[in-house]
Image (cartoon, rainbow, N blue to C red):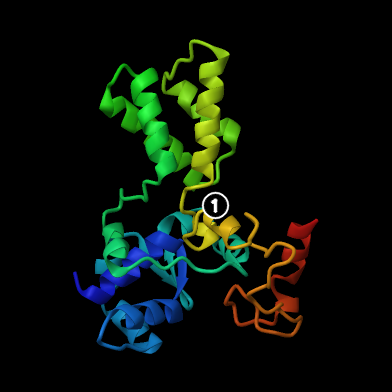
Amino acid sequence: MNLLSRYIVTLTRLYGVVHKDVVAEIYNEQQDEQITSQEIEDYFDASVQEIEKHFAYKEGNYFVHETILAYDDLDETLAKQAGKPRYIPDKNELMKHMDEFYFYKSEAYKKLYNHVLKYHVDGNEERAEEVCEDAEGMIEVNASFLTVMSTLDNLGVEFNSKQQRDKVKRLVRKLQDNVRLWTNKGHTNQELKDLGYSAAGNASAGNQVLTKKIGRNDPCHCGSGKKYKKCCLDKDNKMKI
């Protein structure tokens, strides 16, 4: 697969949705060859079948993962990403996302895995991996804490005492803060907190807001080309209630 195709696919997998201008910016930062947004769009149109095999589709000015399109979540995902800084890995880390099953294994993930392996699956590495990958996957799709714990129960993870269950609860909560999320533009919740942002993506009190507030007559952040007041303004206001 061509290098540019790999950038389109891996950035779509990392962010869920990514503007063609961002693909050009990251590509140009990491490669000697320079490319324009229009060249990226033209290339996609010429290579559409190859790229779509990897679940990356073009929607207007965006490349979007099939999962978001399947659940009609494009506008909602863009709204949740708005105002958040973007996580940009080095090119070696980025290219690992060509493997559709790859995900960032944080220290929190490793601690949960080691605990489950030692205390809950009798040293069965395959079972420990299944349990922890399912927990990670549920968090990636924004499942609630209770849903994640129910998933562990459904997988047959047994707890001999309240203390054991409470320990796993703490490890799962830690994992929730350390999973890379599409709604965080690839950052974990913990990374956003360290940057002065809440999980919702707004700068905390005492920290500078990094993005300009959208005016009513400015182009909408969703990329529709409409004015903000005629597009996502009402929806965004409802989300704040």
Residue at the image point whose x is 55% and y is 31% from the top: 170
Q: Where residue 80 appears, x then y in whole percent?
A: 61, 61
- Residue sticking out furthest to the front: 206
**Badge 1 is on which residue?**
190
Q: Which quadrant of the structure image shows residue 66?
A: bottom left
In the image, residue 20 sits, relative to residue 75, either above or below, namely: below
On screen, residue 190 versus residue 7, left or right, reads: right
What residue do we see at 55% from left, 17% from top? 163
Residue drawn at x 52%, y 39% is 174
At mark 1, the secondary structure is helix
Residue 114, by quadrant, is: top left
Q: For the residue carrying disc 1, how many other residues have a C-alpha within 10 Å: few (<14), some (14-19), or many (20+)?
A: some
Res 129 → quadrant: top left
Q: The disc labelled 1 sits on which kind of residue?
A: Gln
Which quadrant is the N terminus positioned in? bottom left
Q: Residue at x 31, y 71 (%)?
A: 7
Quadrant where the image shows the C terminus? bottom right
Q: Position of residue 224 (x, y in %)?
A: 59, 77
Q: Is residue 60 visible?
A: yes
